[in-house]
Amino acid sequence: MSPSAALIPVSPHDTGIAEAATLSGRLTYLCMCLTLCWGVLSATGWVRRFSGQDALRTGHVLLAAFTLATGTLHGLTLLFLEDDPFGVADLLLPFYDGTPRHALGIVGFELVIAVSVTAGLRRGAREGRWLRFHQAGYLAIGLLAVHAWLGAVSSGHLAVVWLAGITLLVPPVLLSVLRVLPAAVLARAGLVTLPPAEPGPEPATLRVDVDSQRCHAYGVCQSEAPQVFRLGLDGQLAYEKRPEAQLVANVQAAARACPMRAIHLLGATR
């Protein structure tokens, strides 16, 4: 099968199938970009002032579900081509048909499925391992974006995708970069303003208190201070109430990063 055979239909039937594949592919691209943006905003707590956490998490999951649904539809439409049909193996096995851009799409989509499945199993896995695997979603979206652009080149739709596609791709890429940059770097770039330094409790007298009603066990605190915070297999958060002096900076970072602001640092009295 030639690389562009599936997107250059011959019969009127295949013309309609190709249009359905194009539309579902563009919807997948849109949902994919929105999913990444909403996920970063939820994980960082940048929009917590505008909505509750349940709404934030639900929005991210809903967008991911739409991405999977439209991506599945995009692949299934190719099974109904008459002139040069795809087989099931073409849609499931990378490089089966010898087309690199199809392989990128298959690998990226299957990786998204794996990340989505593990999201439902996070309660039964170690939080650190789950977070590391969940971050593979960045790689999956990168592969799917390359697949979409190569598909636009092959089908002759690059002019359309260039304007809309690159506009949609800029926010996810920007948010992904901001997600991993330290706060000090963002402050030097003028993107955020660090709070003024305030005299706090002495490191030796620092006391940690977590509001169990506000905590939703996202595990951000464990990523920042694993020696102090730890999520158990039951999803409950265990923590050291009086961390050691050398861990105070990590605990303060965990308190700042908590999306629900459930961590309170207090000066203990002796």
Image (tube, rainbow, N blue to C red):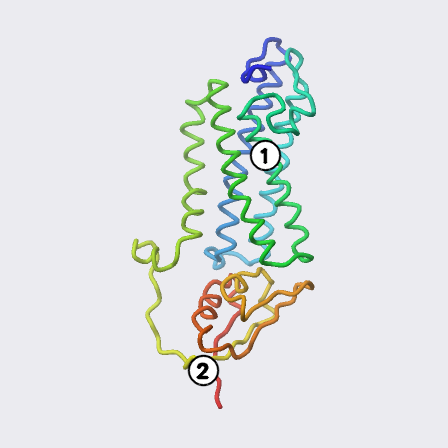
Q: Residues within 10 Å of mark 1 (few under 14, many from 20)?
A: some
Tally of numbered discs: 2
Give the residue displayed 49% in from the left and 90% down from the top: 270
The amino acid pointed to by label 1 is Val
Q: Quick check: 193 left or right of 32?
A: left
- The foreground one among 154 and 99 is 99
Q: Quick check: 164 left or right of 190?
A: right
- The foreground one among 216 and 132 is 132
Hey, which residue is sitting farthest top in the picture? Answer: 11
Instruction: Using the numbered discs, state the Cα–Cα distance from disc 2 to disc 1 in whole angstroms.
Output: 50 Å
User: Where residue 162 appears, x then y in whole percent?
Assistant: 41, 27
Give the residue displayed 67% in from the left and 50% down from the top: 120
User: Where residue 27 appears, x then y in whole percent?
Assistant: 55, 32
Per the image, the residue denoted by label 1 is: 107
Q: Earlier in the sequence, mark 2 or mark 1?
A: 1
Per the image, the residue denoted by label 2 is: 204
Give the residue displayed 29% in from the left and 57% down from the top: 188
Give the residue displayed 62% in from the left and 18% down from the top: 17
The amino acid pointed to by label 2 is Ala
| Element marked by disc 2 | helix
